[in-house]
Amino acid sequence: MSHIVCPHCQGVNRVPDQRLGEAPKCGKCRKALFNAKPISLDDAGFERFASRGDLPLLVDFWAPWCGPCRMMAPAFEQAARQLEPRVQLIKINTEEHQAVAARFGIRSIPTLVLLRGGSEIARVSGAMDASNLVSWTVKHL
Ligand code: ZN
């Protein structure tokens, strides 16, 4: 059984692990828990996913003015299609939501941080293509 935070209403769902791949829906808002795309969060939303969710989180710290970040965005979306439902992919706009970036000491962007149980297990800076994103993530899980 895993606790899955809904990307739409941030309700916490309990889903049997063997049903994660069967397109589970949120018990609160009835929308799909996995949408094959990254979830954009603010500081409070991030805290909720990190503290209440059981799935590993792959967090993309980015900013609108950062060229390499914008270049990597399609690759990050592609990686979401491949990594869900094993991992939830999160985007933090560091210009708008600075608390999380400060907590993780983000100095350059894009930086990717992989979390499990709210704790960092790996990080890498610099843009990557989709296949490298997926293999880097799977290697550290
Ligand atoms: Zn929901």
Image (tube, rainbow, N blue to C red):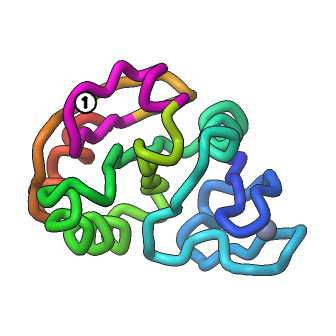
The magenta stretch spans which residues?
99-114
Residue at the right extreme, as displayed: 28
Q: Quadrant of residue 29?
A: bottom right
Tally of numbered discs? 1
In which quadrant will I find the C terminus? top left
Residue type, label 1: Arg
Please indicate whether residue 90 sits to the left or right of residue 133 in the image.
right
Tell me what residue is drawn at x 44 percent, y 23 percent: 102
- The residue to which callout 1 is attached is 123
Please indicate whether residue 113 sits to the left or right of residue 110 in the image.
right
**Percent position of residue 23, x then y:** 61, 78
Tell me what residue is drawn at x 65 percent, y 35 percent: 47
Residue in the foreground of this view, choosing between 52 and 71: 71
Please indicate whether residue 125 sits to the left or right of residue 30 in the image.
left
Say which element carries label 1: strand
Tell me what residue is drawn at x 21 percent, y 57 percent: 69
Q: Is residue 102 magenta?
A: yes
Is disc 1's CB within 8 Å of ligand 1?
A: no
